[in-house]
Image (cartoon, grey):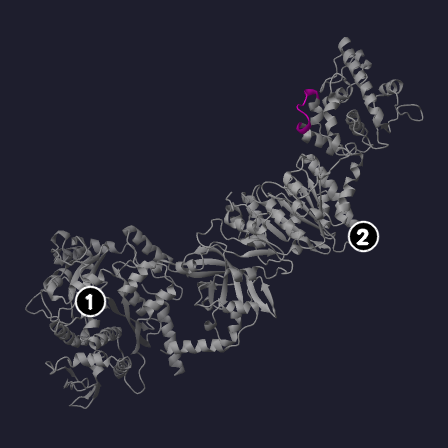
Amino acid sequence: MSYAKDGYPTELANKVGHIKLIQDPMVQRLIESFEDHRPLPDAALPPISGNTDLKCDRTIAQVITVDGGHQTVPNIVRPERQVGFVQVALQMIKLETIEYLSTHPMADPRDVQKLIGNYTHHILAALPVVGMSLPGQTLKDSIRESVHRFIAHYGLYPALAYLVYRQWEPQMTKQPSMQCHLCDAKIDLPRNQLDFKCAKCGESYKLSDYLGLSDRDNDERSTEETVSNFRAALEVLAMFSLIVRFLEREAIMQKTLFLLDGPLLLRAQLSRLVEPIRDLLEHQHRQQRSAYIVGIEKNGEFRNFADAYATRFGSNGDYFIPTTKFLVESVNGRIFDPATYRNRVNYGAKLVARVGTDHVLALNIPTGQFILEPQSSDLIGLEPILCCLSQLPSYAYDNALIPVVLANNASSISNQPSATLLAQFVDSLMKSG
Amino acid sequence: MADTISQELENQLVASMPPATGAIASMAAKYTLESDRLLGLLLKFDFGESHIVTCDPWKRKCGGVPRGSLVLFRVDQRAVDPEDRTFSNRLIIARITDAVPTPVEGHVQQTLFQVHKLQAQLDPLTNKDLQWGALKASIVGTYYDEGDKIAFGNDVDTFFSPFCYVAYAPTDADLAVLINSFVDTSRAVEIGQLRYTETLPPRAIVRVPINIDPRDIVGDQNAAQRLANFGKTRFGKSNSTKIIARAVFESGLNVAQVFFDPSGEYTYINDQDRTSLFALFPSRSVRYALALKPLKHEEQQLGLTQPNQLAIDFYNHPSVGHGLIASLWSTENQNLPLYMRPVVDWASPEAAPPRAQISNFNHYWRTMGMWWAILRRAQFDPPDNLTAPINFPDAVKQDLVNNVAGVRVDANNEFDTHGQPIAVLPAIYQRIWQLYQQDQATAAAGGVAPPRRGARAAAGAGQQQLNFPPSQNTGEPYFNETEVAMLRVIADTGIGGPRYIRPFNKYHSVRGSSIFDEITGHIASGTSVFIDMSQANEVVRNNLVDRICRAIFKLQNDRFNSDTGVGDRFVMLHFEEAHRLFRADDKDMNSIYNLLAKEGAKLNIAMAYSTQSMTTISPDLIKNTDNFLIAHLDDDREAREVARKYAFRELADDVQRIQSKGYVRMITRSHRFALPVQIRLFGPDTAAAQDSAVDNAPAG
């Protein structure tokens, strides 16, 4: 499917190419020997886990949504020079604003923009990916330096330090550590320090290096995955910057829902933050203080499962909390072994919930510590969260929520014309430099 | 943060610039992005048209955006460099022509389809998204300041990218200034209000007065103007004529207006108008009527007197006189006897053929002589020295000389075929009737068939005895049925033929020939003339209009060729059913209407002509017309004809669609583009009439 450029049409695939594949006996025998891992038929779907009265708890009055987008440019035309752009948006919307708009459908867009746009914060960043670096530095060091600068610039270090150094604990119960990328020596991070060195080789580090964003990169080339992970780090740090700041201010926390567009998940080295987050939320819960966090999965296997499961829901407020075994086997189609299963990347349990007549959501809600068979009581703030979400359905897209639509508008970067313009932007800067 | 600071600094920079002083610049300064008049932002902009992205709340704030709305585009000062900000002192005016899809129309449709399918209660944010749409507008022109005057160009000189422009709905006050900016304020007359839609909005309607300069309608010296008033019958053409004519009356211009009033509504106070043009300006007008009617009570109260009798010389203008009798028959007679029917139905020829066409000449005068004899018997006074050059077979002429006293003879003592006096015509035709009766008897006794229409000439001895033998070529009888009927009316004392004609004597005057001089005399003194033709049939009307127009043409032509020239003395003719006068296929250069169309402007003869048929009216006349009022035309061909005029190219569809009385598409010399206007109602109280014109304009 190449050649689709410079005015040429897209190369057409052979429309009868499937015939030989279907008729091949070797292929037929192999497929017959496969085990059937298809999702369960409707009749075999497990029963719902419970129901929430969506009108009973309306303590949450505002939603802060975190969403990000990234784009690596140029992507095709100039492969020798690539920059990754990241845009993360935090957007707060009050439920009373939605109520106002509902009762004032002819509100002037300029006024609406003031109501909504006033509470939008952007974090904008860029990383070198291929073919460029900071003066006198390797690509890998350039990425480390860039990550440090942006985290410092946007004031995200306090949140990072709070999580990494477990600052809610008078005495740190778990020592954070990392490997020196020069000498492979283990480095125990000195508590509350933003700068430290490898005791063995003396290499200098920033706390941002703990995120390990460039650990898999070599000195010449990074990948889009690094940019994607940087975006995920910025999203979670932006969200926890607010959570950490108001952690003990119940007046704020009890009426605020933090909504992440995507699963509550940190991959690769970022997962170093998952355990502190779980512990922090567990601690907060034990202190009987609120921390309402929810992740919305808009695509992927669990979202597909939610669509299939939707038929089991009889009424609004119904929800289903799958066990880890069910998720692994029936949703992901993998083998579940409780003896060996470890989950170091998720900081929320998954559930499917009907929050409106036409809205079935695939959600992640923190449980504190990881639980193999979570119950509704384990999900922190399940009831107020579902009540809140039931007030936010949007019909802009399938199963959309108003705050997610708004945040997506504020954070997404389209391939055209945004990416093209960003590419020209990079070119012009490089030339002028 | 930096953006906010930059924006504030930009605002400060704009505020620090010296304020523009021109009328347009001052007006433009009020239209900012914060304005309540914000309609939208531009998606596309070129020399001809633009696309505006807008939303329901903005349209609502602007009072709705019906098709045909006039909107303004202004350069957003923040979108251009400081040196280009003078462009924002101009206002581009455009006309909304249609809705167009937005670039995300497909996406919106998908969402909407899904919402409808689910019958979902729409969330407020999606609702806001679905409120956006796009409108297409065609560029009308650009208003700008030229010194201390407002200038206008029917185009745009240059343009930036669409991003630089913002669309606004002008306020009523500003729109009134813009639209009327070229109407001379010293003579401006309000003739109606801007009206975008036939359907009246539920909330406040547009109140933009539309003014005209009567000078535009009348014209300048040696360049008189024309006003075309098109529209289907009963869609307010007459009302428009009255409003325009009244404006001319009140203008102070030296104009004598002439109204050929087919229904009497301009001449007499009527229930519809509760006044009349004549009643409003009696001291500057004179009125004529073919048939006088009792003076209405309202007219008596105003001190008005009976119109002047429009007396006709029935002898010299037989077609007018006969037409008048035919059209007024029932007003004077209870019945129409069978023997009179051929006389009344007679199509009186307009003029005598030349003597060289001997057969036609003789036939014409044979019949005309009978008609004159009837008039004489009905006691219509003949003009002095009028004679009829009648002719008959030799034997008959000799018989007449021998038997009829008073017959004029020539030098040879023979019947004088060059002219017989009117006084002797009845006696001549009475004798002719006797001879004709003899023919009938001879034919019956001798076996000779009496002459019958269409029969070939009978051979044989009997034919030689007839006084009036049939035509040897065609076999046609000597007298046709009409002539036989006329002879009988003249001669048969057993019937009371002339008695039926006698009542019409009051319309006759031997000085009828000078009535046209009398009318031109009034016009020459600047007095307007109303001619009530409501009692006349089409033949009479056309004949009278033709003759009066010729007299006026002569008056102005004489003035034009005089030492003082025609000067500023104008005549304005008001024609109705103009397609019957200014015919598209009329190549006759003797036609007074062709003369008026081609030469009238030079002679200070202005014209306001009304018709429901643009397609059959002279194209040359339309080409030389600058002022147009177009009401409802329910015909594709007519609508296409409208669209051929550049100013109306986008309005042809509306002309077919709208059906309210007095709701016209209008352009005059002082208006730079066509406007949808509700013409005010003509009446005694103009202010009240104006309001009710828009609020109560009936559909259909």
Q: Quadrant of the C terminus of chain A?
A: bottom left
- Tell me the residue at 53%/57% (across/down): B208
Which residue position is annotated with label 2? Answer: B561
**Residue at horizontal 63 percent and vertical 60 percent from the top:** B184
Q: Residues within 10 Å of mark 2 (few under 14, many from 20)?
A: few
Task: Give the x, y percent position of residue B86.
Answer: 53, 72
In this view of the protein, can residue A414 be seen by the observer?
no
Left or right: residue B519 compared with residue A270: right
Q: Residues within 10 Å of mark 1 (few under 14, many from 20)?
A: many
Secondary structure type for disc 2: helix
**Along the line of sight, the residue nearer the viewer: B491 or B578:** B491
Q: Secondary structure at mark 1?
A: strand
Indicate whether residue A136 is drawn in magenta.
Answer: no
For the record, the magenta segment spans B330-339
The quadrant in which the N terminus of chain A is found is: bottom left
**The label number, if any, that marks residue A294 in the structure image:** 1
